[in-house]
């Protein structure tokens, strides 16, 4: 059973930085894509960034390009989201998710971690 556990959320001022971590277990993830999504109050969940576990190719939502960086650590089996130049509109619950690379839907989700950016 795949388990994804997020950590690293918190309160930060506009322009600040946070690093989210997702501990992934229960599977060998060589055939998986790990992603980050977020959901703000009253809004739908939206894609933030993703990384293919094998090879490390990445993609980002336009709204975070140049500010956020996704990476993975094979040894610790974690996926990191470094968030810089944070804005109030980045405030949301951030979720880690996983899917097989050949499918489009994410089948596994973490419980989420709150990120709040104050103006």
Image: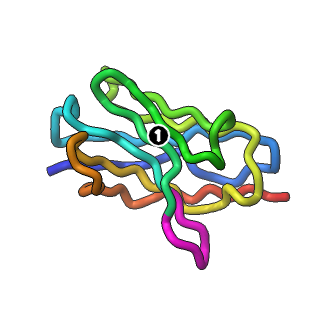
Quadrant the C terminus occupies = bottom right
Main SS class of the magenta portion in the image? loop
Sort mark 1 into few (<14), some (14-19) or many (20+) by Cα contacts within 10 Å: many
x, y percent for residue 66: 67, 33
Q: Name above or below for residue 24 compared with residue 57.
A: below
x, y percent for residue 102: 21, 42
x, y percent for residue 19: 58, 38
**In magenta stretch: residue 44:** yes
Q: Which residues are magenta?
A: 38-45
Name the residue that disc number 1 marks: 21
Q: Name above or below for residue 83 compared with residue 114.
A: above
Q: Name above or below for residue 34 compared with residue 46.
A: above
**In magenta stretch: residue 9:** no
x, y percent for residue 15: 81, 43
Identify the residue at the far right of this view. 119
The answer to whether residue 117 is left or right of residue 33 is right
Residue located at (43% from left, 49% from top): 6
| Residue 50, quarter of the rendered image | top left
């Amino acid at each position: 059973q795949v388990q994804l556990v997020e950590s690293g959320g918190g309160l930060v001022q506009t322009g600040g930085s946070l690093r989210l971590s997702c501990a992934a277990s229960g599977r060998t993830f060589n055939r998986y894509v790990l992603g980050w999504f977020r959901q703000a109050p009253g809004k739908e969940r939206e894609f933030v960034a993703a990384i293919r576990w094998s090879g490390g190719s990445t993609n980002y939502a336009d709204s975070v390009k140049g500010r956020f960086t996704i990476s993975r650590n094979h040894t610790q089996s974690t996926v990191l989201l470094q968030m810089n130049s944070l804005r109030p509109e980045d405030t949301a619950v951030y979720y880690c998710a996983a899917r097989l690379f050949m499918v489009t839907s994410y089948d596994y989700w973490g419980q989420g971690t709150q990120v709040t950016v104050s103006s």
